[in-house]
Every structure is written in structure tokens, then in C-alpha cells.
Amino acid sequence: MVRQLEIKVFPDKLYDRPGHESLLMSQLRAYKGRVMDFRLVRRSVDARGSRPVYLLRYDVYIDEPYTEPPLISAGYKDVSGGQPVIIVGSGPAGYFAALKCLEYGLRPVVLERGKDVRSRRRDLRNLQQEGLVDPDSNYCFGEGGAGTYSDGKLYTRSGKRGPIEKVLHILHEHGATEDILVDAHPHIGSNKLPNIIAAIRHTIEKHGGEVHFGTRVTGLIIADNKIRGVRCEDKSFMAESVVLATGHSARDIYHMLDDAGLALEAKPFALGLRIEHRQSFIDKVRYHQEDREENLPASSYAVVSQVDHKGVFSFCMCPGGLVVPAATAPGEIVVNGMSLSRRDSPFANSGYVTSIDPEELESNGYTGPLACLMFQADIEKRMFEAGDGSQKAPAQRVLDFVEGVGSEELNPTSYIPGLIPAPLHTLLPEFVYRRLRLGLMDVDKKMKGFITNEANIIGVESRTSSPVRIPRNPENLMHPDVFGLYPCGEGAGYAGGIVSAALDGQNVITALVRNIAASKLKK
């Protein structure tokens, strides 16, 4: 028998295992002498009281021992002679789709436009220090996708998509710590993710799958409304199943599909700025302490308001983190956030964005399935033109932004390329500025001091999600125009982060296998 119990402990008792067991046994007097093991299964911080506490949930094994579950990777097959499945993109959707192929005996052929995870580091260094943007190797493109070097948060609200725990266990089997299996808001860190991503690739290749870097897909090979393969710059790959897992920034893929006459849809997304405070301020507000207590993590926040019937909210909050340049082409400024595993930067940053609907862009001249994409691109170009031709990002002090006045000076920042004073309140479209301004005023009522000239607000946070949806049939998950073409993950508009993208990648392969079986029955 397994019973699940919860206890509360102060941060200084977080690692007092004998103390935890004593608290648990006080609830288990009727089972004295029959308890065989305790397993921590959930850990979270409750900061609502005057002093934060940890909520710890344990599985207690009574009259039976705990046994380790079998490794998921033990079920992977040798697929070297299996039916090929082309997977375009090596982000979480693509790589987890490839791992699912190994379960079914299919041979994944992963095509990645960028470089392997280690080679990618040099291009990120050039982007950070020299302002040089490689269109195929940056914070969005390359092995592991956008999540590899921009934080590695693993929490999601998309439990309806499938077993989140399986995704976490796969990451753990490839090198992530056990913490991700128990933390309420698991996080790996951009310094540790590269090794995990490389380990996943090795698993794919060891079982007979293929991963090709520097391989940009330039066209689809279609005959009789069925996929036959893909064209790349110097060769073609043939298969009867193609998974498009290209991420939310692969604009060339959207244009390629549009030029081919395939159905696309403009999709609501969010756009705004990235706000950066001192981490000590966020800790003080959230934990009610002048100095953060030992064993407490750098604190985070999540805020949401409604302005003009539109959501205004924080996005990808990075406690103890860094603001990074996320442009994917020269002539644009895009910012994002990341944290290392220790989250020990003196700064906290978060996207602060508002929902953008295709309908509200029509009056501004943006129409058609790529309307939101073109709007997004124009704002990013406007931010670049406000600067000095480098990757220095336009910024304002937060109070100045709210009051609509320019900032002559800016605060220290974690953003390595540097900041340049710019009137973000006029660079943004008026309706976007209005909603962000009123939203910040609402947040300041809940977090006193959030609006301050000791914090910066930086432009532009625009790659929150895909501005385009690649439609798919809800029954077979294929594109309605092409049999065997599977839009997948965040770039197709069906996920919003590492875990949800990974789940979508696995779900697409399950649907693909079901479709193959149905086709064989018809024959």
C-alpha cells in the first residue's frame, strides 16, 4: 500500500530527512513498524505567510518496498532498417518525436538547419559580443531549439496533452537532476541543457536514427496531394511521413508553405517588452524578507491583468536570470530571458506582453494568414532602427515608460550587448503601449514598487509564440492539404514551451503510427 502525505517545513529544515520522516510518522501511528520507505514526490514553496515554508509531498510505502520504475529508454528499438520519418527541426518537439519513433520501430531522420549544440555556442558568443546574427545559428535555431540556451523551464499547464512525467523522466535519464521530478516549477538551466540535448541525440543515433545539421529545408516534395519528401539546399530526403517541428521563428517555412498554396492561419500571439528588476527587490516583495533565507530559490512572479478586454501578462519570468538577444536575422532587435541552473544573477527579468489578435491588425493594414508575422517583423525592425546598428537594445526606465517620457540614463543590466536609451512609448504602436502601461499600473497595486526608475524595460519581446498556425486535422494530425505532412509543436501553433512541445512531438508520432496502420488495413 502507498499513502501520500504532505508536510510543511521551514527552509532551514529542507534537507533534514530524519525530521521529515518524524513528521510523517506522527501521521502514521496506526502503521508503526510497517513503513518500509519514504519517497519525496513533490516540492514547492508557499510564500503567502509571514515566513515562507516548503510544502513537501511524500509517497509512504506500507507493507511493500519501493521499486525503481523501468527506464523508458529500455523500450527503444534498433530502427536502422525501419521505415523513415523525416523530422524537420531538432527542438523539443522534433527530438521527442524522434524518441517516440524509437519506441515504434520507425527510423527518425532529423533535419536541422543550425549547428550541433556545442558548435552553436560560438555563434551565440558572436551575437552577444559582436552583434553578429547568424540566420541559421542563434538563440532560436540550432540543436535543441529555442529552449536550450534560453532557460530550460519545464513547467506547463498543458497536462491534457499527455503524461508530463514521462517527458521529465526522459530528461532525467539523459542527465537532468532528480530535482526536476519533484519540483513544482522544474528548471534545468541553460548551462546544463546542452549536455542533455547532446545525450538525446546520441540515443537517437545509437538506435539507428539520423541527425543532419546544416540542413535547411527549402521545399516539400508532393505528388497526388501526398508527401514524398523534402528538398534541401544541396540534396533531397525521401519519406512518406514528414513532421514539421521548426519552432516559432522559422519564417522561411511559413513563406515556403504559403508560396506552395498550402493552408495557413493567422494566429493570436503576444508582444511587448522585457522588464528587469534587481532580484533582491523581487525577493523582498515575494518572501517578505530583507534578505532571502538560505535554501530559498530566487523568487519569481506571475501577473496578469485585463485591459480593453485583452490580456496583459508576464511571460517567461527568469529569476536570477539574464536578458539575451534573440534576433534570427540582421536588422532586427528581439530580446528574451534565460537563467543558469543556480539562478544566481543579481537581476530578475520577465517578458511583459499583451495579446495581439489578427482582427485588430486589419485596421493597420495587416491582412492574410501572415498578418501577425508581418506585424511582428515590422516592430522588430523598428526597434533595430531606433538603435545604433548593433544589437544594443532600446530601453527606458520603467517609471519613465509609464509616464511617457524619455530616459536620459539607464540602470545596470544583465544584457551583454548593452542598452541604448529610446522612447519605447512611441516606438510601440499606441494600442500596445496603452495596454502595457495600464497593465503595469495594475501590477504596481499588487507589487508595490514594481513601477520604479531603478528598473529597466527593454524592447522588444515578440517571440512569445508562433504568429501563424499550420492547420491540421484533429483526428489524424495531418495537414488538410497534404497526406503525410504533420505540423507539430510550437512553430505550428500547438505548443507553448519545452514540455508542451515535447508532448506534441510524441503525440504526433502516435497519430502517425495509427495512420500507417489504418492505411495498411485499407490496402
Image: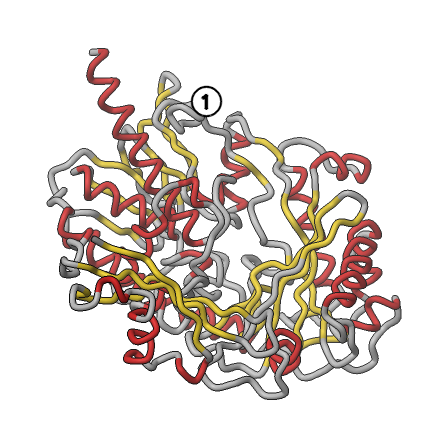
The answer to whether residue 332 is seen in the rendering is no
In-image side of 53 versus 390 (left or right): left
Q: Toward the viewer: 92 or 44? A: 44
Residue drawn at point x = 61 percent, y = 71 percent = 349
Residue drawn at point x = 33 percent, y = 52 percent = 165
Single out the residue that lies furthest toward the front.
Answer: 30
Residue 356: x and y, percent? 70, 44
Residue drawn at point x = 34 percent, y = 80 percent = 15
Residue drawn at point x = 66 percent, y = 60 percent = 303
Q: Residues within 10 Å of mark 1 (few under 14, many from 20)?
A: some
Number of marks drawn: 1
Residue 270: x and y, percent? 65, 49
Q: Secondary structure at mark 1?
A: loop
The answer to whether residue 47 is seen in the rendering is yes
Residue 252 vertical placement versus 436 (above, below): above
In-image side of 43 versus 394 (left or right): left
User: Mark 1 sits on what residue?
Assistant: 480
Residue 18: x and y, percent? 28, 80
Q: Toward the viewer: 211 or 279? A: 279
Amino acid type assigned to the residue bearing label 1 in the image: Pro
